[in-house]
Image (cartoon, rainbow, N blue to C red):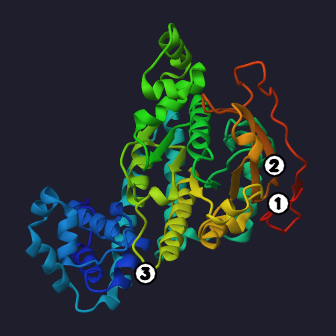
């Protein structure tokens, strides 16, 4: 009979202590272990503080970890001295992998015991599904328990089987942006896809992201919207204007003609209850994005926009952008979330206002270009910019595994409405797509092909 679950508290203390000694040990800890692997709740709290500091590229030591833990968690652990004492639990940080594997081995043992209980108690026919899931989980643990990270190894045959099994899903895993002309080119966003939508100030980046977010939420997908520039109430005015056809300036100035308030209320009524939530904080960082997206169980994350985010610390701005992009892409890949990021085009495009942007016009283009699956540029010809009813070009300059080309979308400036539902007799009622070309096999679509 088992009185206590398998656990090695000394190993847990040692691996945490190692992370307080060297940056390399802290990174190894953050990359290879999770909070659930620790048996003691107090150790989980220390682990979370360390991972948070690593994510922010901050120094990890007993002082910074104590500060990051917060008053309650720190008191439960025994105070700052108890955190400092962790370093005495290990003579050298070189043993971090050994102790980490010991922590993981005990976690797997606890999991196997719990799963064995489920199997043993699944005696009724209706318990068959629970038993089968438990047995499959036990097989997964058996394959991965021999080494930290070995569970990420996939053989060629396993990859083939996984790819073939996806065929049965059909296209339902793709999430359309809801802007029809764009979706006809890219077909939709797949698990882990990262899309950047770029333009100069005033080009319509926020409007585009908001349109996509509302469309996806109206289709039943949970959307988390991060805006470091405007408050949620300011952003939502754009939705109210687009849905009602009442000019945006009237909502901003609160100057309405007779019947317009009722028109706004009636226009937004069909959208009430859609699963779209705003993270209303200036300069959100990666931890904010990860935490809120997790708690909201988001399917889609929209970040408006790159330079309004609190970027990781680094010596040069390009390195900060590179670190942010790499981790944002990894976050989406690990959680199967689709991510849409708004970004600026560099000022060189202002010198040639009628030149259509290309990938090299992205600010810090190298680090952004290599991380994204889709790159969309918003462009309007000079003669279109001052029209109330105009056409905006969405240049799909990069599409990983899809076509590239240009989608022309109706743009009604007074109501900030994108799409073919533009009020007024002069509005264009179609969303044409220019000729586009699919990249050749083994070739990535990273430039315009008309």
Alpha carbons under labels 1 and 2: distance apart: 9 Å
Closer to us: 150 or 449: 449
- Few, some or many residues within 10 Å of mark 1 (<14, 14–19, 20+): some
Q: Which mark is residue 349?
A: none
Please say whether residue 215 is visible from this viewpoint. Answer: yes
Residue 89 in the image: state x and y as whole percent.
Answer: 19, 83
Q: Which mark is residue 448?
A: 1
- Few, some or many residues within 10 Å of mark 2 (<14, 14–19, 20+): many
Closer to us: 27 or 105: 27
Say above or below: 36 vs 105.
above
Q: Are marks 1 and 2 in contact (CB under 8 Å)?
A: yes
- Mark 2: which secondary structure? strand
Q: Is residue 85 left or right of residue 54?
A: left
Residue 36 in the image: state x and y as whole percent.
Answer: 34, 60
- Few, some or many residues within 10 Å of mark 3 (<14, 14–19, 20+): few
Alpha carbons under labels 2 and 3: distance apart: 37 Å
Which quadrant does the C terminus fall into? bottom right
Residue 142 in the image: state x and y as whole percent.
Answer: 51, 67
Say above or below: 441 vs 200.
below
Q: Quadrant of residue 326?
A: bottom right
Q: Is residue 400 left or right of residue 151?
A: right
Alpha carbons under labels 3 and 1: distance apart: 33 Å
| First in residue order: circle 1 vs circle 2 | 2
Q: Which residue matches tag 2?
A: 406
Q: Which mark is residue 315?
A: 3
Q: Are marks 2 and 3 in contact (CB under 8 Å)?
A: no
Residue 345 in the image: state x and y as whole percent.
Answer: 63, 60
Say above or below: 117 vs 221.
below
- Mark 1: which secondary structure? loop
| First in residue order: circle 2 vs circle 3 | 3
Residue plotted at (38% across, 59% down)? 287
Which quadrant does the N terminus fall into? bottom left
């Amino acid at each position: 009979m088992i009185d206590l679950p398998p656990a090695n508290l000394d190993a847990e203390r040692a691996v945490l202590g190692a992370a307080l000694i060297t940056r390399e040990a802290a990174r190894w800890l953050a990359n290879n272990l999770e909070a659930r692997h620790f048996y003691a709740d107090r150790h989980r709290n220390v682990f979370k503080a360390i991972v948070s500091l690593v994510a922010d590229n901050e120094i990890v030591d007993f002082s910074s970890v104590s500060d990051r833990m917060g008053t309650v968690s720190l008191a439960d652990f025994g105070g700052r001295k108890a955190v400092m004492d962790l370093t005495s639990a290990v003579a050298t940080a070189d043993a971090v992998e050994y102790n980490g594997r010991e922590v993981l081995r005990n976690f797997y043992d606890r999991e196997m015991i719990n799963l064995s209980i489920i199997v043993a108690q699944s005696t009724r026919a209706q318990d068959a599904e629970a038993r089968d899931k438990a047995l499959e989980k036990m097989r997964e643990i058996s394959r991965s328990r021999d080494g930290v990270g070995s569970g990420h190894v996939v053989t060629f045959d396993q990859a083939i089987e996984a790819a073939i099994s996806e065929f049965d899903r059909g296209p339902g895993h793709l999430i359309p942006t809801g802007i029809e002309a764009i979706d006809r080119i890219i077909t939709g966003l797949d698990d882990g896809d990262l899309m950047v939508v770029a333009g100069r100030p005033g080009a319509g980046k926020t409007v585009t992201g908001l349109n996509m977010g509302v469309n996806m939420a109206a289709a039943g997908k949970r959307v988390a919207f991060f805006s470091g520039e405007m408050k949620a109430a300011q952003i939502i005015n754009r939705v109210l204007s687009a849905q009602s056809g009442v000019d945006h300036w009237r909502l901003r100035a609160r100057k309405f003609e007779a019947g317009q308030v009722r028109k706004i209320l009636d226009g937004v009524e069909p959208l009430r209850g859609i699963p779209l939530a705003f993270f209303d904080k200036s300069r959100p960082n990666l931890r904010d994005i990860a935490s809120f997206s997790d708690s909201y169980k988001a399917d889609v994350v929209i970040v408006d926009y790159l330079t309004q985010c609190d970027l990781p610390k680094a010596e040069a701005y390009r390195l900060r952008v590179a670190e942010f992009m790499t981790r944002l892409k990894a976050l989406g890949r690990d959680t199967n979330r689709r991510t849409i990021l708004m970004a600026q085009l560099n000022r060189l495009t202002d010198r040639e206002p009628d030149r259509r942007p290309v990938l090299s016009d992205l600010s810090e283009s190298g680090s952004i270009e290599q991380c994204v699956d889709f790159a969309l540029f918003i462009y309007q010809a000079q003669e279109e910019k001052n029209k109330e009813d105009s056409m905006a070009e969405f240049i799909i300059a990069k599409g990983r595994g899809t076509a590239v080309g240009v989608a022309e979308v109706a743009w009604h400036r007074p109501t900030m409405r994108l799409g073919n539902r533009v009020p007024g007799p002069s509005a264009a009622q179609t969303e044409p797509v220019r000729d586009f070309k699919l990249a050749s096999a083994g070739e990535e679509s990273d430039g315009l092909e008309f």
